[in-house]
Amino acid sequence: MVTNYKYNMLYHVTPCYEYLSGRNRLDSITTYAGRISSRYHYDAIGNLIRDTGEGLEISWNAAGKVDTIWKNGNVLSTFCYSATGQRQMKRTGTITDYYIHDASGNVMCIYRQEGNALSALERPIYGSKRLGEYKQRVAVPTGIICLGDTGTIGFRQYELTDHLGNVMTTILDRRQPYNSGDDTYKPYIVSTTDYYPFGYPMEIRSTDTGEYRYFFNGQEADNEVFAEMSNFTAEFWQYDSRLGRRWNLDPLFKAYESPYACFAGNPIWYNDKFGADTAFRDNFARQNFQDAYQQISQKIATVENHISKIREKGLQRNWKTSKIENKIKKDKDKYQYDMLKDMKQGLEDIITSSIMFTFSTEESKIKSGTGGHTTMPDDNSVLIYFRKNSLGNFIHESRHGWGVTRKEWSNKGGYDTTDEIVAFEWQQVFDAEAVSNFIEMAQRKYNQNNHDPSTWKIFSLEDAIYFIYEEDSNRNIIKSSTPVPAP
């Protein structure tokens, strides 16, 4: 970028980005000299299909994945995918890589075919996340070691990441002395990388990649497209780190933001591991959101179908309007229709809010014995943590999140027991057993603290919340509870 000032005022910035009118799609980039360096063309649904400056043409499959990339008229790379969207094959020139995944979608091994020779190229190493790769090549099917001897030291390449999951350094599993004959050692550093905010590598602060595959956001780099670490792939995007824009539309629509925007314009704070959306820190969080929204929508549709049948039946039998409306009200109450509508509205308000919401299932952030928590570190961001694969916990914490959009609470004053009651009522729709266990736990704790059986209570949900969250077993607020029947 070239920036010029005149009379201490900014009056010209290059390059200049121009957009298609009303489409929010990048049309061209113009250099300082007025020369158009690139023009961009899109298909009917918004996927990038041509970059004239790089001589690229891109075709997409029906699932919205890159199928083939041409460069200057020649095929550069072709790709194949699994039914669930993970990359399974990449062919560049005479080299073909095959990806083997586990049931969760993690890459377990990458095989490489060059001509007729097939070998196991890389085997990722995992703990709670990917830690590195084991890179001793083994021929298939002979099992002959292709690279190095039969030893294993020196073939494990570990990644050191920052707080966003960007791979900053890779090291080997062996040490090297500071000086010849010295008995002090240092790590064997293979590569170092530092990034500009949107992921383009800083040349002056980066070294050779060490043939490592993963870099910005921990995502795989397709180095053949532009240059090393300029183009990245994930489950839901192909990403250009030079422009800070994706090639395809964000699968999660947000009315307030361009569907090509990334990291909410703030890559210092947010990451996007799957290319799905900055709102979800991990795949479990994204899946829980989708599952909850789908189930809520289905429940609403079921109730509305019942209501339609009641109206039809009433008209056929000439019922009074009041009778029809009473039956509809009973049906709505039975299936908690109004609450379901609130849930759906709440999730939609969260995603379209100008406040940045982030969902995560990171266990280390969740207190022991709780299903999650919601916090607001500043006026413009909300962090929602919940236990994975629990729609009940997710919808509970989402109710607190919706409270922020409704100005029911803020970072200057947290939510109170009234908010907690509504959140538990939402949770009860998806996980009645967990709410029942919570009430029983509170009741048991209260009765244990009161040794006189005549003071024991049968708790309601409201009682349990006031008792647990106020942490006061003698509060007079516990009024709605029923005394335990005398033996």
Image: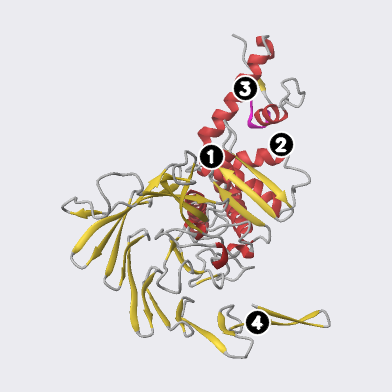
Q: Which residues are magenta?
A: 459-463
Mark 3–mark 1 distance (CA, rounded to whole Å): 27 Å
Q: Nearer the viewer, mark 2 or mark 4?
A: 4
Residue 462 place in picture, x, y as percent: 67, 32
Which residue is identified by label 1? Answer: 363
Mark 2–mark 3 distance (CA, rounded to whole Å): 17 Å
Which residue is identified by label 2? Answer: 417
| Crowding near the residue tagged with mark 2, few <14, some 14–19, many ≥20 C-alpha atoms within 10 Å | some
Q: Looking at the picture, tell me which residue is in the foreground, 416 or 179.
A: 179
CB atoms at circles 3 and 1 under 8 Å apart? no
Q: Quadrant of the N terminus?
A: bottom right
Secondary structure at numbered mark 1: helix
Residue at the spot x=76%, y=23% of the render? 475
| Crowding near the residue tagged with mark 1, few <14, some 14–19, many ≥20 C-alpha atoms within 10 Å | some
Which residue is identified by label 4? Answer: 14
Q: Quadrant of the C terminus?
A: top right
Residue 416 place in picture, x, y as percent: 73, 39
Q: Nearer the viewer, mark 1 or mark 4?
A: 4
